[in-house]
Image: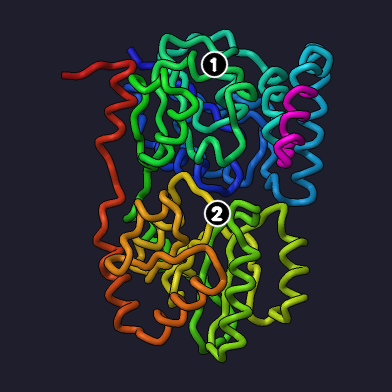
Amino acid sequence: MSKNILFVINTLSRAGAETALLELLPLFREPEYDVDLYVILGQGELVGLVPEQVHLLNKKFSDLSVLSGKGRLCMFGTVCRAMLRRGNLFRRFPYLVANALRMLKKGRFQSDKLLWRVLADGAPRFSKEYDLAVAYIEGGSAFYVADYVKAKKKAAFVHVDYQMAGYDRKLDQDCYLKFDRIFPISEETKKSFLELYPECEGKTAVFHNVINQDSIREKAKMPGGFTDDYDGARILTVARLTKQKAFPTAIETMKRLKDAGVKARWYVLGEGDERKHLERLIREEGLTQDFILLGATGNPYPYYKQADLYVHATAYEGKSIAIQEAQTLACPILVSDIISNRQQVQHEVDGMVAALTPEAMASAIQELIADPDKARRLGENAAKRKISYEDDLEILINLIDPRE
Protein backbone atom coordinates (compact mmCIF):
# COMPACT_ATOMS: atom_id res chain seq x y z
CA MET A 1 0.00 0.00 0.00
CA SER A 2 1.26 3.48 -0.89
CA LYS A 3 2.47 5.78 1.86
CA ASN A 4 0.61 9.08 1.88
CA ILE A 5 2.86 12.12 2.22
CA LEU A 6 1.96 15.81 2.36
CA PHE A 7 4.46 18.60 1.72
CA VAL A 8 3.52 22.16 2.66
CA ILE A 9 5.43 25.27 1.62
CA ASN A 10 4.65 28.98 1.79
CA THR A 11 5.04 29.87 -1.92
CA LEU A 12 6.40 28.42 -5.13
CA SER A 13 8.33 31.52 -6.11
CA ARG A 14 11.90 31.36 -7.35
CA ALA A 15 14.04 30.97 -4.21
CA GLY A 16 16.33 28.44 -2.56
CA ALA A 17 13.87 26.42 -0.47
CA GLU A 18 11.36 26.20 -3.32
CA THR A 19 14.07 25.04 -5.72
CA ALA A 20 15.27 22.42 -3.24
CA LEU A 21 11.73 21.11 -2.73
CA LEU A 22 11.21 20.71 -6.47
CA GLU A 23 14.38 18.60 -6.57
CA LEU A 24 13.23 16.51 -3.60
CA LEU A 25 9.69 15.71 -4.75
CA PRO A 26 10.63 13.48 -7.73
CA LEU A 27 12.52 11.17 -5.37
CA PHE A 28 9.20 9.97 -3.94
CA ARG A 29 8.13 7.70 -6.75
CA GLU A 30 4.81 6.00 -7.43
CA PRO A 31 3.41 3.54 -6.52
CA GLU A 32 5.40 3.39 -3.28
CA TYR A 33 4.46 6.95 -2.35
CA ASP A 34 1.37 9.05 -2.95
CA VAL A 35 2.46 12.68 -2.59
CA ASP A 36 0.31 15.79 -2.10
CA LEU A 37 1.54 19.38 -2.10
CA TYR A 38 -0.17 22.38 -0.54
CA VAL A 39 1.10 25.96 -0.98
CA ILE A 40 -0.04 28.35 1.76
CA LEU A 41 -0.25 31.43 -0.48
CA GLY A 42 -1.36 29.48 -3.56
CA GLN A 43 1.08 31.45 -5.65
CA GLY A 44 4.45 31.24 -7.41
CA GLU A 45 5.98 31.11 -10.88
CA LEU A 46 7.57 27.67 -10.31
CA VAL A 47 4.23 25.85 -10.22
CA GLY A 48 4.83 24.50 -13.73
CA LEU A 49 7.81 22.54 -12.41
CA VAL A 50 5.81 20.49 -9.91
CA PRO A 51 6.28 16.82 -10.93
CA GLU A 52 3.29 15.18 -12.61
CA GLN A 53 2.96 12.50 -9.94
CA VAL A 54 2.53 15.14 -7.21
CA HIS A 55 -1.04 16.25 -6.48
CA LEU A 56 -1.36 20.01 -5.96
CA LEU A 57 -4.16 20.52 -3.41
CA ASN A 58 -4.74 24.23 -4.04
CA LYS A 59 -8.08 24.70 -5.85
CA LYS A 60 -6.85 28.01 -7.25
CA PHE A 61 -3.26 28.86 -8.02
CA SER A 62 -1.60 31.96 -9.45
CA ASP A 63 1.68 31.68 -11.32
CA LEU A 64 2.52 35.30 -10.50
CA SER A 65 5.71 35.91 -8.58
CA VAL A 66 5.11 37.24 -5.08
CA LEU A 67 7.80 39.82 -5.92
CA SER A 68 6.01 41.32 -8.93
CA GLY A 69 3.51 44.18 -8.76
CA LYS A 70 0.55 42.05 -9.80
CA GLY A 71 1.82 39.26 -7.60
CA ARG A 72 1.83 41.53 -4.56
CA LEU A 73 -1.77 42.50 -5.22
CA CYS A 74 -2.71 38.85 -5.49
CA MET A 75 -0.88 38.10 -2.24
CA PHE A 76 -2.62 41.02 -0.51
CA GLY A 77 -6.00 39.56 -1.47
CA THR A 78 -5.00 36.17 -0.06
CA VAL A 79 -3.93 37.77 3.22
CA CYS A 80 -7.19 39.73 3.50
CA ARG A 81 -9.31 36.64 2.89
CA ALA A 82 -7.33 34.69 5.47
CA MET A 83 -7.87 37.44 8.04
CA LEU A 84 -11.63 37.43 7.50
CA ARG A 85 -12.03 33.65 7.37
CA ARG A 86 -13.16 32.04 10.65
CA GLY A 87 -12.90 35.42 12.39
CA ASN A 88 -9.11 35.17 12.38
CA LEU A 89 -8.47 38.90 12.57
CA PHE A 90 -10.38 39.20 15.84
CA ARG A 91 -9.21 35.88 17.24
CA ARG A 92 -5.56 36.65 16.50
CA PHE A 93 -5.70 40.34 17.32
CA PRO A 94 -3.90 39.98 20.69
CA TYR A 95 -1.19 37.85 19.02
CA LEU A 96 -0.71 40.37 16.22
CA VAL A 97 -0.53 43.36 18.54
CA ALA A 98 1.81 41.74 21.06
CA ASN A 99 4.25 40.51 18.44
CA ALA A 100 4.10 43.74 16.45
CA LEU A 101 5.04 45.69 19.58
CA ARG A 102 7.92 43.31 20.30
CA MET A 103 9.21 43.74 16.75
CA LEU A 104 8.99 47.52 16.98
CA LYS A 105 10.80 47.46 20.30
CA LYS A 106 13.61 45.50 18.66
CA GLY A 107 13.65 47.98 15.76
CA ARG A 108 12.85 45.30 13.20
CA PHE A 109 9.23 45.12 12.07
CA GLN A 110 8.61 42.17 9.71
CA SER A 111 5.05 42.02 8.45
CA ASP A 112 5.57 38.72 6.64
CA LYS A 113 6.69 36.97 9.82
CA LEU A 114 3.71 38.46 11.66
CA LEU A 115 1.10 37.39 9.13
CA TRP A 116 2.14 33.77 8.60
CA ARG A 117 0.10 32.75 11.65
CA VAL A 118 -3.08 34.32 10.22
CA LEU A 119 -2.44 32.77 6.81
CA ALA A 120 -2.02 29.34 8.36
CA ASP A 121 -5.21 29.78 10.41
CA GLY A 122 -7.13 30.87 7.32
CA ALA A 123 -5.96 28.09 5.01
CA PRO A 124 -8.29 25.23 4.02
CA ARG A 125 -8.31 22.13 6.20
CA PHE A 126 -8.08 18.62 4.75
CA SER A 127 -9.73 15.59 6.31
CA LYS A 128 -7.19 13.13 4.91
CA GLU A 129 -4.78 11.59 7.38
CA TYR A 130 -1.20 11.26 6.14
CA ASP A 131 1.54 8.87 7.05
CA LEU A 132 3.91 11.84 6.97
CA ALA A 133 3.33 15.60 6.78
CA VAL A 134 6.31 17.84 6.03
CA ALA A 135 6.49 21.58 6.62
CA TYR A 136 9.23 22.44 4.17
CA ILE A 137 9.95 25.98 5.38
CA GLU A 138 9.55 28.20 8.43
CA GLY A 139 6.53 30.38 9.12
CA GLY A 140 3.15 29.56 7.61
CA SER A 141 3.87 26.01 6.54
CA ALA A 142 5.28 25.09 9.97
CA PHE A 143 2.28 26.62 11.77
CA TYR A 144 -0.17 24.92 9.42
CA VAL A 145 1.31 21.42 9.66
CA ALA A 146 1.74 21.65 13.42
CA ASP A 147 -1.84 22.74 14.09
CA TYR A 148 -4.10 21.71 11.22
CA VAL A 149 -2.78 18.59 9.49
CA LYS A 150 -3.65 15.05 10.53
CA ALA A 151 -0.57 12.87 10.24
CA LYS A 152 1.02 9.91 12.00
CA LYS A 153 4.39 11.64 11.76
CA LYS A 154 5.31 15.28 11.24
CA ALA A 155 8.61 16.80 10.11
CA ALA A 156 9.75 20.40 9.68
CA PHE A 157 12.61 21.86 7.65
CA VAL A 158 14.51 24.98 8.73
CA HIS A 159 16.22 26.83 5.86
CA VAL A 160 17.51 29.96 7.57
CA ASP A 161 19.43 31.10 10.60
CA TYR A 162 16.30 31.04 12.72
CA GLN A 163 17.24 33.86 15.04
CA MET A 164 18.85 36.15 12.46
CA ALA A 165 15.76 35.78 10.27
CA GLY A 166 13.61 37.22 13.05
CA TYR A 167 11.79 34.16 14.37
CA ASP A 168 11.40 33.30 18.03
CA ARG A 169 9.27 31.07 20.24
CA LYS A 170 6.68 33.71 21.04
CA LEU A 171 6.13 34.33 17.35
CA ASP A 172 5.82 30.65 16.42
CA GLN A 173 4.11 29.69 19.71
CA ASP A 174 6.40 26.70 20.30
CA CYS A 175 5.05 24.95 17.21
CA TYR A 176 8.21 22.88 16.73
CA LEU A 177 7.46 20.92 19.89
CA LYS A 178 4.66 19.26 17.88
CA PHE A 179 7.01 17.79 15.26
CA ASP A 180 8.58 14.33 15.37
CA ARG A 181 11.71 15.40 13.48
CA ILE A 182 13.25 18.74 12.59
CA PHE A 183 15.65 19.11 9.67
CA PRO A 184 17.88 22.20 9.51
CA ILE A 185 19.74 22.34 6.20
CA SER A 186 23.21 22.94 7.68
CA GLU A 187 25.15 22.59 10.91
CA GLU A 188 25.04 26.36 11.51
CA THR A 189 21.29 26.45 10.91
CA LYS A 190 20.93 23.58 13.36
CA LYS A 191 23.00 25.38 15.99
CA SER A 192 20.94 28.57 15.72
CA PHE A 193 17.67 26.66 15.93
CA LEU A 194 18.71 24.61 18.97
CA GLU A 195 19.73 27.74 20.86
CA LEU A 196 16.01 28.55 20.90
CA TYR A 197 14.75 24.96 21.14
CA PRO A 198 17.35 23.04 23.19
CA GLU A 199 14.79 20.41 24.17
CA CYS A 200 14.49 19.41 20.48
CA GLU A 201 18.11 18.32 20.13
CA GLY A 202 17.31 14.61 20.17
CA LYS A 203 14.94 14.90 17.21
CA THR A 204 16.95 17.35 15.12
CA ALA A 205 19.25 16.30 12.27
CA VAL A 206 20.83 18.06 9.30
CA PHE A 207 19.14 17.38 5.95
CA HIS A 208 21.12 18.99 3.13
CA ASN A 209 19.43 20.66 0.18
CA VAL A 210 18.79 18.29 -2.70
CA ILE A 211 20.63 19.46 -5.79
CA ASN A 212 20.71 17.81 -9.23
CA GLN A 213 24.19 18.55 -10.53
CA ASP A 214 23.71 16.70 -13.82
CA SER A 215 20.64 18.79 -14.60
CA ILE A 216 22.49 22.01 -13.75
CA ARG A 217 25.36 21.13 -16.09
CA GLU A 218 22.96 20.31 -18.91
CA LYS A 219 20.96 23.52 -18.45
CA ALA A 220 24.20 25.52 -18.49
CA LYS A 221 24.73 24.36 -22.07
CA MET A 222 21.38 25.73 -23.21
CA PRO A 223 21.00 29.05 -25.06
CA GLY A 224 20.97 32.04 -22.78
CA GLY A 225 23.24 34.08 -20.60
CA PHE A 226 24.65 37.56 -21.11
CA THR A 227 23.41 39.46 -24.14
CA ASP A 228 25.72 42.48 -24.04
CA ASP A 229 29.13 42.55 -25.70
CA TYR A 230 31.09 43.53 -22.60
CA ASP A 231 34.70 42.34 -22.78
CA GLY A 232 35.80 42.98 -19.18
CA ALA A 233 35.46 40.72 -16.15
CA ARG A 234 31.89 39.64 -15.44
CA ILE A 235 30.92 39.34 -11.77
CA LEU A 236 27.71 37.43 -11.05
CA THR A 237 25.42 37.23 -8.02
CA VAL A 238 22.21 35.16 -7.96
CA ALA A 239 19.96 36.15 -5.08
CA ARG A 240 16.68 37.76 -4.10
CA LEU A 241 16.84 41.53 -3.74
CA THR A 242 16.36 41.62 0.02
CA LYS A 243 18.16 43.23 2.94
CA GLN A 244 19.58 39.86 3.94
CA LYS A 245 21.68 39.80 0.77
CA ALA A 246 23.53 43.05 1.64
CA PHE A 247 23.41 44.54 -1.86
CA PRO A 248 24.30 48.09 -0.69
CA THR A 249 27.69 46.67 0.30
CA ALA A 250 28.03 45.05 -3.13
CA ILE A 251 27.18 48.36 -4.82
CA GLU A 252 29.77 50.23 -2.78
CA THR A 253 32.26 47.48 -3.63
CA MET A 254 31.61 48.00 -7.33
CA LYS A 255 32.11 51.73 -6.85
CA ARG A 256 35.54 51.07 -5.37
CA LEU A 257 36.44 48.75 -8.23
CA LYS A 258 35.42 51.36 -10.78
CA ASP A 259 37.35 54.13 -9.02
CA ALA A 260 40.41 51.86 -8.96
CA GLY A 261 40.20 51.40 -12.73
CA VAL A 262 39.25 47.73 -12.60
CA LYS A 263 37.56 46.68 -15.82
CA ALA A 264 34.59 44.76 -14.44
CA ARG A 265 30.82 44.72 -14.51
CA TRP A 266 28.57 43.25 -11.81
CA TYR A 267 25.35 41.44 -12.79
CA VAL A 268 22.57 40.34 -10.42
CA LEU A 269 19.94 37.71 -11.20
CA GLY A 270 16.93 37.99 -8.92
CA GLU A 271 13.98 40.08 -7.86
CA GLY A 272 12.80 41.42 -4.53
CA ASP A 273 11.28 44.23 -2.53
CA GLU A 274 14.59 46.12 -2.39
CA ARG A 275 14.75 46.75 -6.15
CA LYS A 276 13.70 50.41 -6.13
CA HIS A 277 16.01 51.20 -3.22
CA LEU A 278 18.93 49.49 -4.97
CA GLU A 279 18.21 51.22 -8.28
CA ARG A 280 18.41 54.54 -6.47
CA LEU A 281 21.74 53.62 -4.87
CA ILE A 282 23.09 52.52 -8.24
CA ARG A 283 22.14 55.84 -9.82
CA GLU A 284 23.58 57.85 -6.95
CA GLU A 285 26.91 56.03 -7.25
CA GLY A 286 27.02 56.51 -11.02
CA LEU A 287 26.98 52.77 -11.68
CA THR A 288 24.07 52.35 -14.09
CA GLN A 289 26.39 50.74 -16.65
CA ASP A 290 28.43 48.85 -14.06
CA PHE A 291 25.98 47.22 -11.62
CA ILE A 292 23.16 45.60 -13.58
CA LEU A 293 19.95 44.21 -12.08
CA LEU A 294 18.90 41.66 -14.68
CA GLY A 295 15.78 40.40 -12.89
CA ALA A 296 14.84 36.76 -12.41
CA THR A 297 15.26 34.08 -15.06
CA GLY A 298 14.07 30.51 -15.44
CA ASN A 299 17.54 29.26 -16.35
CA PRO A 300 20.39 31.09 -14.60
CA TYR A 301 23.01 28.46 -15.38
CA PRO A 302 24.38 29.85 -18.68
CA TYR A 303 25.17 33.03 -16.72
CA TYR A 304 27.18 31.05 -14.17
CA LYS A 305 29.08 29.33 -16.95
CA GLN A 306 29.92 32.62 -18.69
CA ALA A 307 30.84 34.59 -15.54
CA ASP A 308 34.44 35.20 -14.51
CA LEU A 309 33.60 35.31 -10.81
CA TYR A 310 30.64 34.41 -8.60
CA VAL A 311 30.19 36.60 -5.50
CA HIS A 312 27.86 35.71 -2.63
CA ALA A 313 28.04 38.57 -0.12
CA THR A 314 25.27 38.06 2.43
CA ALA A 315 24.67 39.22 5.99
CA TYR A 316 23.33 35.83 7.09
CA GLU A 317 22.40 32.59 5.39
CA GLY A 318 21.10 29.10 6.00
CA LYS A 319 22.89 27.21 3.27
CA SER A 320 23.14 28.77 -0.15
CA ILE A 321 21.94 26.79 -3.14
CA ALA A 322 23.42 29.52 -5.36
CA ILE A 323 26.88 28.72 -3.99
CA GLN A 324 26.28 25.03 -4.70
CA GLU A 325 25.23 25.86 -8.25
CA ALA A 326 28.37 27.95 -8.75
CA GLN A 327 30.49 25.09 -7.40
CA THR A 328 28.81 22.63 -9.74
CA LEU A 329 29.77 24.82 -12.72
CA ALA A 330 33.37 25.38 -11.55
CA CYS A 331 33.01 29.10 -10.91
CA PRO A 332 35.67 30.97 -8.96
CA ILE A 333 33.76 31.97 -5.82
CA LEU A 334 34.03 34.79 -3.31
CA VAL A 335 31.78 34.73 -0.23
CA SER A 336 31.26 36.98 2.77
CA ASP A 337 32.80 35.89 6.04
CA ILE A 338 29.85 34.36 7.90
CA ILE A 339 29.84 30.90 9.44
CA SER A 340 27.41 29.28 6.98
CA ASN A 341 29.41 30.52 3.98
CA ARG A 342 32.67 29.28 5.52
CA GLN A 343 31.08 25.84 5.81
CA GLN A 344 30.53 25.87 2.05
CA VAL A 345 33.74 27.52 0.87
CA GLN A 346 37.26 26.90 2.17
CA HIS A 347 39.37 30.04 1.87
CA GLU A 348 42.18 29.82 -0.70
CA VAL A 349 41.27 26.17 -1.44
CA ASP A 350 38.00 26.18 -3.40
CA GLY A 351 37.14 29.86 -3.17
CA MET A 352 37.86 32.99 -1.18
CA VAL A 353 36.28 34.40 1.97
CA ALA A 354 36.31 38.11 2.79
CA ALA A 355 34.76 40.37 5.41
CA LEU A 356 31.45 41.91 4.41
CA THR A 357 32.92 45.36 3.82
CA PRO A 358 33.46 47.22 0.53
CA GLU A 359 37.20 47.40 1.22
CA ALA A 360 37.66 43.66 1.83
CA MET A 361 35.35 42.53 -0.97
CA ALA A 362 36.92 44.87 -3.51
CA SER A 363 40.42 43.74 -2.57
CA ALA A 364 39.53 40.05 -3.00
CA ILE A 365 37.80 40.68 -6.33
CA GLN A 366 40.80 42.62 -7.64
CA GLU A 367 43.09 39.78 -6.61
CA LEU A 368 41.04 37.17 -8.46
CA ILE A 369 40.65 39.30 -11.59
CA ALA A 370 44.39 40.04 -11.66
CA ASP A 371 45.33 36.36 -11.24
CA PRO A 372 43.22 34.28 -13.66
CA ASP A 373 45.31 31.15 -12.97
CA LYS A 374 44.40 31.31 -9.30
CA ALA A 375 40.75 31.96 -10.13
CA ARG A 376 40.69 28.98 -12.48
CA ARG A 377 42.33 26.72 -9.86
CA LEU A 378 39.80 27.73 -7.20
CA GLY A 379 36.95 27.08 -9.62
CA GLU A 380 38.28 23.63 -10.49
CA ASN A 381 38.57 22.77 -6.81
CA ALA A 382 35.05 24.07 -6.18
CA ALA A 383 33.72 21.62 -8.77
CA LYS A 384 35.30 18.74 -6.83
CA ARG A 385 33.61 19.63 -3.54
CA LYS A 386 31.00 17.20 -2.22
CA ILE A 387 27.64 18.96 -2.27
CA SER A 388 25.22 16.09 -2.96
CA TYR A 389 23.93 13.98 -0.05
CA GLU A 390 21.67 11.27 -1.45
CA ASP A 391 21.69 9.34 1.84
CA ASP A 392 19.81 12.14 3.61
CA LEU A 393 16.56 10.94 2.05
CA GLU A 394 16.67 7.85 4.24
CA ILE A 395 16.37 10.03 7.35
CA LEU A 396 13.00 11.25 6.11
CA ILE A 397 11.82 7.88 4.80
CA ASN A 398 12.64 6.19 8.09
CA LEU A 399 9.93 8.22 9.78
CA ILE A 400 7.24 6.24 7.98
CA ASP A 401 9.10 3.18 6.71
CA PRO A 402 11.86 2.18 9.16
CA ARG A 403 14.59 0.19 7.50
CA GLU A 404 17.41 -1.83 8.97
Is residue 99 inside the magenta stretch? Answer: yes
Image depth: mark 2 or mark 1 in front: 2
In this rendering, the answer to whether 389 lies above or below 338 is above
Q: Quadrant of the C terminus?
A: top left
Q: Position of residue 241 (x, y in %)?
A: 64, 56
Which residue lies under the disc numbered 1?
A: 146
Residue at left 73%, top 26%? 99
Is residue 388 inside the magenta stretch? Answer: no
Which residue lies under the disc numbered 2?
A: 315
Dot 2: what SS?
loop
The kind of residue on which mark 1 rests is Ala
Residue interval drawn in magenta: 96-111
Q: Within the image, what quadrant is residue 256 found in?
A: bottom right
In this rendering, the answer to whether 362 lies above or below 49 is below
In this rendering, the answer to whether 332 lies above or below 208 is below
In this rendered view, identify the residue nearer to me: 216 or 102. Answer: 102
Residue 82 shows in the view = no
Residue at left 63%, top 68%? 294
The residue most toward the left is 404
Q: Within the image, what quadrant is residue 399 found in?
A: top left
Q: Main secondary structure of the magenta part?
A: helix
Label located before the other in sequence (2 or 1): 1
